Amino acid sequence: MASRLTNEVTDAASDLLLGTARHRTMLFPRRRTTPRTARDFVAATLTEWCETSRLDDMRLCTSELVTNAVLHGAPVGRLVLVRVESLDAELRIEVHDSGEKRPTKRVPKESAVDGRGLLIVAATADSWGVKERTGPGKYVWAAFDRAKNGAAPILPHTTGPQGDTT
């Protein structure tokens, strides 16, 4: 992955990783409509992969993480990258931006109308965190354990003929 989020790619890209994992990424502009568009991208990807056991939770976390990236992470003129991964043990959403400020979970005042995004992610996802990127920025991720969410384990890919070959 490039270390800078630029306007180089705007369409979804799907790649198979080693083993049984798969992922899909898409770059989004820093706009008010980006959280909705990113939610739709994640939902379409997971539906295509038949990974819908916690689709609503994953859409909610995507919305919260992308909203944070748009409002606080991505500098003006930069993009937000959303990555969906289907791994052996978990489903994972990553939101990358080129901003240097690391998000922190905080407890807002009761009357505040914002500041609850990471609290929602922490309560909804099985785990979450923040990692530095190579180059500028960071990514915030939310993971959903297969063992906890009722998703079927991914079976290893095999090559060659299946069944009896005689």
Image: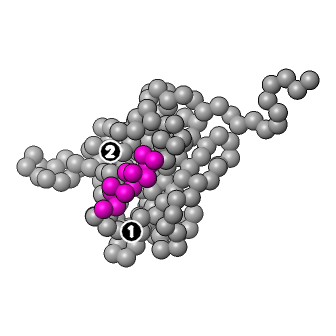
Q: Residue furthest right?
A: 166
Position of residue 61 in the picture relative to residue 107 (left or right): right
User: Magenta region's main secondary structure?
Assistant: helix
Question: What type is the residue that disc 1 sits on?
Answer: Pro
The mark nearer the N terminus, 2 or 1, is 1
Position of residue 115 in the picture relative to residue 8 (left or right): left
Q: Name the quarter where the N terminus is drawn.
A: bottom right
Asked whether 9 or 142 is in front, the reply is 9
Position of residue 18 in the picture relative to residue 149 (left or right): right
Residue 60 coordinates in the image, percent (x, y): 32, 45
Asked whether 2 or 48 is in front, the reply is 48
Residue 38 coordinates in the image, percent (x, y): 39, 55
Asked if the magenta segment contains residue 42, the reply would be yes
Q: Secondary structure at mark 2?
A: helix
Residue interval drawn in magenta: 33-44
Asked if the magenta segment contains residue 89, the reply would be no
Asked whether 49 or 138 is in front, the reply is 49
Q: Which residue is mark 1?
A: 29
Q: Is residue 30 visible?
A: yes
Please tell me which residue is depicted at 10% across the width and 46% down the height of the picture.
Answer: 110
Give the colour scheme shown.
Answer: one colour
Please tell me which residue is depicted at 26% across the width and 44% down the height of the picture.
Answer: 119
Q: Which label belongs to residue 60?
A: 2
- Please tell me whether residue 27 is drawn above or below residue 165 in the rendered image: below
